[in-house]
Image (cartoon, rainbow, N blue to C red):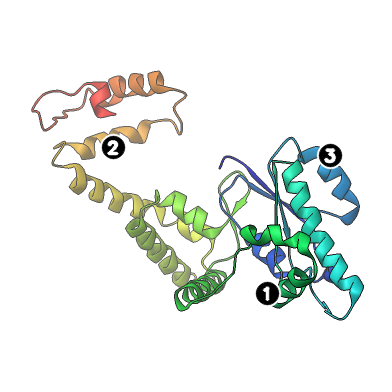
Amino acid sequence: LKSITLIIHALNKGYPSSIFSLISAIKLNSSVEIKTLDINDIETLAKNYIGKKSVWLFLDEMDQNFCAFNDSERVKIAALLKASYDMTKFFSDLKIRISIRPNVLSVLQKEYSCLSGLRQYIVNLNWNTNLLKKVLSKRIESYLINLLFDGEFDLGKGKRQVSQFISKLSFERPRWMIELCKLASKNALADHSSYIHQEHFYCSMKKFGELRCIDLSAEFNSNCKNIDKIITGFSHAPRLFRDAHNLIEFIKKYILPLDIELYKNHKPTAKEII
């Protein structure tokens, strides 16, 4: 997914619904954008998105305070379901998900025959031990992250979640991530800090880099006897290479002059180094 925009509007007199809370907690990647929408902007939203982009509409707790003995309540919910169904048929890019209690749906289906065609689109939300365990573990994980780390960290392009910050610094390797966190926590203890700050990670990078060089040398030594020289050679590299040509030219200038030998016992080319 290259880009996601989550547009949220909360009813309930300012108290967020469960789906509102769920969507607000979603942090898939840096391309996710979350906007909170005022009720007066919904018409503008429809004009800007529907028919141009894929739109997902989540409606939660629409049956709140539902009373089966109230005619207007039954009509209101039944009309919502039918209208939503018709709209998704007319607008192919519009996806609507509505959460309704099973007992409410049962009452409506018995009274309104127009809802019989919706049965194939009904998904029962069931929980089991494994799913609840995952939910619980995520809540504990979130609590511990907030307890240990000082808010969100800056990667140079705005604030990011701590997990994303650590993932980038550890090159998305689990063992490296654990070692980096251990080094950062030692720095935090040395500072008598209650939290692990971003600076504690940066202060760990020298030792972390030394350990990574040792790991890479051990991992790729069977392919190249002098892998440590290649790693050291790239210490002169710019932060980013504009294209493959610049990378190859850098390798020719700084890496190939080094005494490097591949498993084939011959001097490598720039492309073999890559």
Q: Dot 2: what SS?
A: helix
What amino acid is at disc 3? Lys
Which residue is tagged 1?
A: 102
Residue 37: give x, y in percent of width and height: 82, 53
Amino acid at the residue labelled 1: Pro
> Residue lying furthest front in this view?
113
Residue 11's spot in the image, x, y percent? 83, 65
Give the residue number, with chain letter if any, for mark 3.
Answer: 47
Disc nearer the start of the sequence (1/2): 1
Corner quadrant of residue 228:
top left
Residue 2 in view of the camera = yes
Residue 194 makes an appearance in the image: no
Relative depth, front residue between 8 and 102:
102
| Label 1 CA crowd tier, 10 Å (few <14, some 14–19, many 20+) | few
Amino acid type for the residue under numbered disc 2: Thr
The residue singled out by tag 2 in the image is: 232
- In three-dimensional space, the C-alpha distance between marks 3 and 1, rounded to whole angstroms, equals 33 Å
In front here: 16 or 87?
A: 87
As drawn, is 103 to the left or to the right of 112? left
